[in-house]
Amino acid sequence: MKGIFISYRRQDSQSAAGRLADHLRDAMAGVPIFRDVETIEPGVDFVEAIGRALQSCGVLLAVIGPRWSSATDTNGKRRLDNPDDYTRLEIATALQRPDVRVIPVLVEGAVMPGGEELPDDLKPLSRRNAIELTDKRWEFDVSTLGETLRKALDIDPPPKPPPQPKPAPEPVKPKMAAWKKWALGLGIPLFIIGAFVSEQEVPEPLPPSPPLPAPVYNNPQPSAPVQGPLTGIWQDGEGGQYKLLQQGFQLALQGSSPHGNVIGTGQINGNQIGMNYTINGVPYQAALLVSPDGLRMSGQYRSPANGDAGVVGLVRVQ
């Protein structure tokens, strides 16, 4: 299998070249990767080792950093101008081989050097399309490079992971009854409504009710509280039937009138009751007086939504 030769200048891009080599080893298992400091054994002629590696590689990656073309030796001369410079030898040898693809790899913000900056044997490098590796997009950039390398080396893409089993569908939640939806919309705690549904459950104490609107008629001063709780079944003159639950000075209402489902809350003040409720979602207010024996209620109602108003009377039937 043809391998990958990573050419770099230690003064310029040693860490980036090492990072790239590690990534390619993980992503392209089994593909030979040559990088001088790791693959040349002590005592081996460097030039001969490079020559053998280039004979067996199908791609040379020329890693170019910001100082790749300007790096100098101990005498202050540009290394790239030295015919025996190892980096120059690696790339120039690869450019002369038709079976080796040379890919410039720009790192750390480097730009591709122009032909005028390069010695004659490296000028063809300036005409090669380069790929840029950035820290912010490293995984994406190296993955893109990996796809190019697989095509150049005629390597099959890695197998796709098996599809995850399709999760079981979530159980269908039962639809909420209409009166429960209105209870949520009005902020009525569900445990109040639950007291109507199951007479076996013991209701918890009710939280304080929100302030009620002003009564819809000029009622007299509150009299003494009615005798006995108002909890029970009540009926109006039109055949509507309602369940009332009293806890302290608060009421919860749920039932059915000839005009639709009714749900609401109220507050007791002596023998007076202020109610907020809805009929099929339309808001209503009512002010009622309770008889001393606690068996009858009468008063007036109105709707701030549609202006509907009238009188109402309720009789306890249970």
Image (spheres, rainbow, N blue to C red):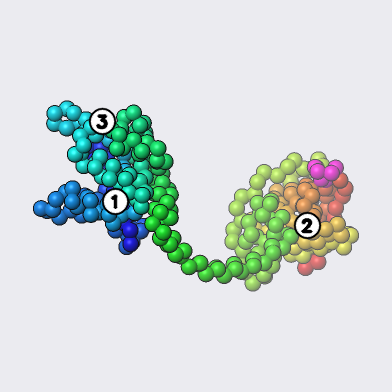
SS under mark 3: loop
Q: Is residue 171 above or below residue 6?
A: below
- Residue 279 or residue 77, whichever sits in front: 77
Q: CA distance from mark 2 to mark 1?
A: 81 Å
- If you read the primary sequence from the N terminus, does the residue marked by circle 2 or circle 1 appear first? 1
Mark 2 in CB contact with mark 3 (< 8 angstroms): no
Q: Position of residue 113 (x, y in %)?
A: 35, 32
SS under mark 2: strand
- Quadrant location of the N terminus? bottom left
Instruction: Say which residue appears at 62% left-offset and 63% top-offset.
Output: 203
Check if residue 304 falls in the magenta segment: yes
Instruction: Say which residue appears at 30% left-offset and 54% top-offset.
Output: 57
SS under mark 1: strand
Check if residue 296 falls in the magenta segment: no
Question: Is residue 207 something that shows in the picture?
Answer: yes
**Which residue is the site of mark 1?**
5
Instruction: Say which residue appears at 69% left-offset and 62% top-offset.
Output: 176
Residue furthest right in the image: 238
Give the residues drawn in magenta, as a range.
Answer: 302-307
Question: Is residue 135 something that shows in the picture?
Answer: no
Residue 262 shows which numbered tag? 2
Q: Position of residue 292 (x, y in %)?
A: 77, 56
198 sits left or right of 110 in the view? right
77 sits left or right of 148 in the view? left
How packed mark 3 is, by other alpha carbons closer than 10 Å (few <14, some 14-19, many 20 or more), is few
Query: What is the three-letter code of the residue carrying label 1?
Result: Phe
Residue 70 shows which numbered tag? 3
Query: What is the three-letter code of the residue carrying label 3?
Result: Ser
Query: What is the three-letter code of the residue carrying label 2?
Result: Val
How packed mark 2 is, by other alpha carbons closer than 10 Å (few <14, some 14-19, many 20 or more), is many
- Quadrant location of the C terminus? bottom right
